[in-house]
Image (spheres, rainbow, N blue to C red):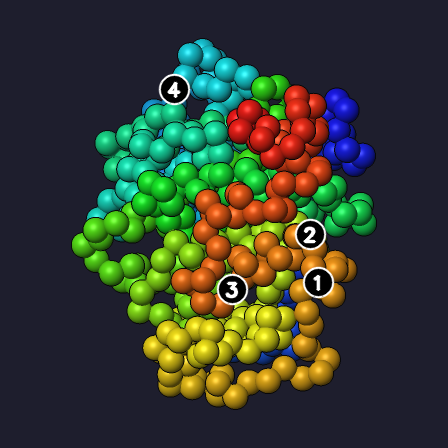
Amino acid sequence: MGNGDDGHEGMLDEAMHTSEEVVARPREEKEVEKEKKKKPKATTTSRMSNQVKKRKAASSRGTTGIPKGLARVLEGYDIVRKIGEGTSGVVYVVQAKDDGQCDQTTNRFAIKAYKTVSKKGVCTAAIREIGLLRELNHPNVIRMNKVHIAQKERAVFLSYEYINHDLHEIIRRHVSQHKKIPEYTVKSLLWQILRGVDYLHSNWVMHRDLKPSNILITAEEGKSQGSAKIADFGLARLFRNTLQPLRADGVVVTLWYRSPELLLGTQHYSPAIDMWAVGCLFGELLRLRPLFYSHQLPGNTFQVNQMERIINILGRPSTTRWPALTEMDHWKNNTNNIQNYKPTKGKARKLESMLSMKKDCTAIHLLKRMLEYNPQKRITAAEALKHEYFQSEPYPGSNCFVENQMGKGPNNLEITL
């Protein structure tokens, strides 16, 4: 990593091979035993049926687990390995034998194999992601290369630049080393994420699923080393002149990064939900653990545990500061008695004490502006980029691992990207 901060040199070499979570959520052994007892013993017929299903599934994936359509449309390319899987698709790393269509710096690219929805064809997430990425072009947003279509298999594949690591890995690596992320790295990562979010919002795009695993980080040495790029636009949505209400899309944003208005069942929401998620990312970079983690309740019920966790740290929301609170479905209906919830003495904590920071420091001030209950008063990405937090040393740069040596001061911020 050259002359970067201590702990960055080679800090991500093993990250792709580790799988432990920042916060473990094991199931109770007794519950597992109960479920085992409830399950009926499989009959010979059911076993045979399951075996047939497995053979059919294996046939559709090919002998190596790679979708047949993907192997065919990428003839002449080597599929290196699977690197991730989400609700909408599976991502692979592909090595091109002819480097004409892949990233020139690594000779590799990533490709997402979208999951189909029965016989209806491609999932909505694929259509949205492809449509948006064709138009977006920013240093802090993932770049799409090409769309591959396998007509026979009725499958769609999206190839984009290969970024070798993500924000979750950086956090996890520092947790394992028992050391904080250097201030310069935190500030540079946040600054780059805000630049990407500001670009999206300026072009009427809400991401709606900002979380550590969706912030990719370039770790290899080169021109783009230390760059943060927003990825996974499967839940992204244009919010200008929409034909359908945004709420019609159902649940958005991963639970720990979901804003209070979404949790409380708002009828309408704005790009401010992305800024709440960015605030959660900022806090996680400082703390090395999610700020608002809780156990997710099954189904689409009111996630009362998550809302209570937020109240424990930020205090109770008030209609004085957030008049629209009375219009939130779960608050209005007092679901799970949320209106009367008061954290016990052992659960109540303040942000500054959690992060071991002074109340009046600029980082805490910016974080609180991002975690404002009222979405109309929540700071925007454009406003956050001008915050005094970025106007003091260490100044943010385009390489989050190696401090910028080209100049100092807020007037030099724009030269880095």
Q: Distance of mark 4 from mark 1, alpha carbons?
A: 58 Å
Q: In which quadrant of the rendered image does the N terminus lie?
A: top right
Task: Using residue 353 as the reference point, say whether residue 117 is left or right of it.
Answer: left
Q: Which residue is mark 4?
A: 75
Task: Using residue 152 as the reference point, say whether residue 187 is left or right of it.
Answer: right
Disc 4 versus disc 1: nearer the observer: 1
Where is residue 74? Give x, y as percent.
38, 23
Disc 3 versus disc 4: nearer the observer: 3
Q: Are marks 4 and 2 in contact (CB under 8 Å)?
A: no
**Residue at left offset 18%, top offset 54%:** 243
Q: Which residue is mark 2?
A: 286
Q: Which residue is mark 3?
A: 372
Residue type highlighted by circle 2: Leu
Q: Distance of mark 4 from mark 2, alpha carbons?
A: 45 Å
How many discs mark residues in the rendered view?
A: 4
User: First in sequence: mark 1 or mark 3?
Assistant: 1
Residue type highlighted by circle 3: Glu
Q: Which residue is mark 1?
A: 359
Q: Secondary structure at mark 2?
A: helix
Q: Are marks 3 and 2 in contact (CB under 8 Å)?
A: no
